[in-house]
Image: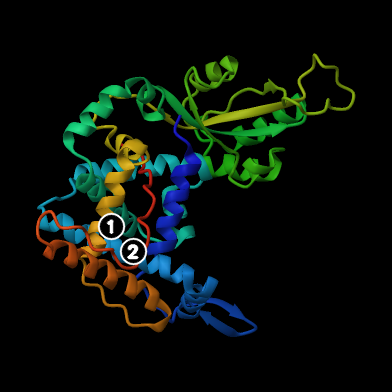
Amino acid sequence: MRKLTALLAVIIIFALLGAGCGRKKNESIAIVNGQPITKSQLFDALEQADNGQAGRQALDSLIVRQLIRQEAQKRGLQVDPKELDGRLEAVKDYVLAATGKDFKTWLEDTGQTEEELASRISTQILTAKLVLTDEDRKKYFEENQDRLKSLPHNTESVIYREIILPSKEEAEAVRKELLAAATEGKVASAKFAETAEARTLNPVEKQRGGMAGWLVKGKSGDPELEKVLFQLTPGQVSEPLPMTAPGAPEAKGKTPQQPQFWRLVSVEKKIEPGPITLERNADVIEEWMLNDPRFQLQLQEFFTNIRAKADVQITPPRYRSLAEAYKEGREARERRMSQPSGAAPTAPGTPPPPAPQAQPGPQGK
């Protein structure tokens, strides 16, 4: 299974770098004893953090995103709306499994809109189109069939919540409470999440409404849990299930043969697998390729080249070093291009900032 933490880290970076661009800078984001703190003040504080390093990196990332789009336009490259929609749908699944929040709530919490996120995912797609060839993609896809078979969208899987309780009796009582609030035997996700936040013994899941995450059939190591989960339909609540916590101290008064805890589980979403094709797994292949040492040099050269070709003018003094890096990189490129064939290369000036690390994109449908 792909690491959810890696994906969410990328999404959070997207939110920090681009969310809210173009919104009102004087919008109040906090009120302290009646006195407002504005978004503009927050931006100023972020720009000055670490002697301007944070602002410098964020500005460079925004410049590179613009350069990528300009380069793609020059080459006539576009993003297929269907491909973009598929990636957005996959992001929704990963957000749910990692945070327990629906997509709309997560967008609000991270201060961005779906349009802004779609724009940043589009930039990812264009970067891969600019750096990777169709032949390399196809070959890499064929070489990694076994890895692809274990991914959540390529095999039967579920996203589920659970409530962990200290005894079977308490688990039965909580289940009765949930069913009393059910409609036609289905418990609303919000109700289950609210109950989990109040009752579950798992401190991590408590903060995300009991969300346990993604379970891929045959990969959990718990066949009994799998059997129950894949028999449930979304909204149904299981009977109390016995469980033990590996390495946990024995509960007082219980023998090693007795369950230490009991849990109720409910499926949030079932994933029906589709055919394993390059089209459906394009984002996964891109992620793996751009993080593969065999393709890192191509990615580095691409970013270095588009920076060196760009005419970037930066005026604030705090970003002077970034402006000088772009200028010197461009001048070094112009010197190299003006040299006769076979001439020894001129020593370049201060290189531009390092290329952003290749970032994984959400898995395609």
Work out whether 206 lies above or below 170: below
Disc number placed over residue 128 in the picture, else none: none
Looking at the rendering, which quadrant does residue 80 occupy?
top left
Query: Which is more toward the observer, 169 or 37?
Result: 37
Which residue of the protein is positioned furthest toward the right in this rendering? 253
- Element on which disc 1 rests: helix
Work out whether 325 lies above or below 296: below
| Labels 2 and 1: the sequence-earlier one | 1
- Element on which disc 2 rests: loop
The residue shown at (70%, 41%) is 199
The residue shown at (48%, 36%) is 3
Which residue position holds label 1?
A: 304
Work out whether 259 lies above or below 298: above
Image location (x, y in percent) of residue 286: 30, 39
Which residue position holds label 2?
A: 351
Whether residues under marks 2 and 1 lie with C-beta atoms below 8 angstroms apart, the answer is: yes
Residue 365 seen by the camera? no
